[in-house]
Amino acid sequence: MNEREEVLQLMKQTFLRVAPRDRASGVRRFFAEATIAAGLLALDGDPGTPLARGLAVGVADDDPVLGPVFSLRDRLGDRQLEQTWQIQAVRWGFLGHPAEPKALLRFQVIADLRPPTASRKAWVQRISRAMLLDPFFLEASLLRRFNEPGCLIWLIPESVATREAARRGRGSMYDVLSYCLPIGVAGEGRTRAIEQAFDFLASHHFRGRHAFARQSH
């Protein structure tokens, strides 16, 4: 078990200890198929274009679910990627501690992965991975992008996000998109889980901080 997995298990046990018996199964579902997100990176392109604003969710390069997909993405052009990586659903969840300033956002991506082949009978792999974000360790302005109309949401390898953040302070969309997996457009409707996170932060008189806001515990 690596450090990320150990932290994940500690988080799970923390919330299970305070969950009423009838809600324990919900806490277990919250942590199912989940990993700790590496952080958030703001991506900015040319104003007034479809690529004007973006937000990338960092994922560990060696993630057992998404790591192989990133490796495949490196070998695909944009058109091939559209045929290979097809988003089926994006789901949100929020979990707040009843007595302490501890909370988590759950950002789950469900996609079908189709191999780049001419055969119509090629296998299709269902990919499901949930990224957990700690709102206490992230900038409020980054979290708000999840509810910003037109903002493009991506998954990005942690090494690429870290390199880009160190070079520019925030990401240039054109420099990193060839490494990213597209998720969709934010702001179609306000994400209730994001609003719950802000309400929880406000109840603890907390204002966000940090940028690629690498999460640390």
Image (tube, rainbow, N blue to C red):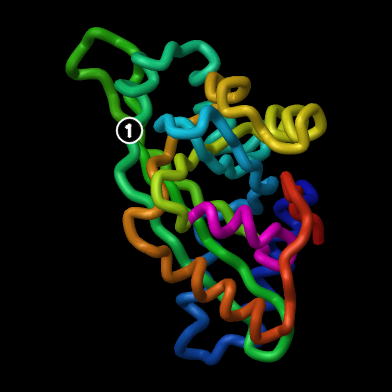
Quadrant location, the C terminus: bottom right
Relative to 115, say whether 1 is above or below: below
> What residue did someone put label 1 on?
86
Relative to the observer, which residue lies in front, 83 or 190?
190
Q: Residue furthest front?
A: 48
Q: Position of residue 94 (x, y in %)?
A: 52, 71
Relative to the observer, which residue lies in front, 24 or 137?
137
Res. 31 image quadrant = bottom right
* Residue type indicated by callout 1: Gln
Question: Is residue 140 one of those drawn in magenta?
Answer: yes
Residues rendered magenta in the picture? 134-146
Q: Position of residue 81 (x, y in %)?
A: 39, 20
Magenta stretch secondary structure, dominant:
helix
Res. 125 image quadrant = top left
Which class describes the residues within 10 Å of circle 1: few (<14), some (14-19), or many (20+)? some
Give the tally of numbered discs. 1
Position of residue 163 in the picture relative to residue 41 (left or right) = right
Position of residue 120 in the picture relative to residue 186 (left or right) = left
Q: Secondary structure at mark 1?
A: strand
Position of residue 117 in the picture relative to residue 177 (left or right) = left
Q: Residue at x 67, y 63 (%)?
A: 134
Residue 1 seen in the figure: no
Question: Is residue 152 one of those drawn in magenta?
Answer: no
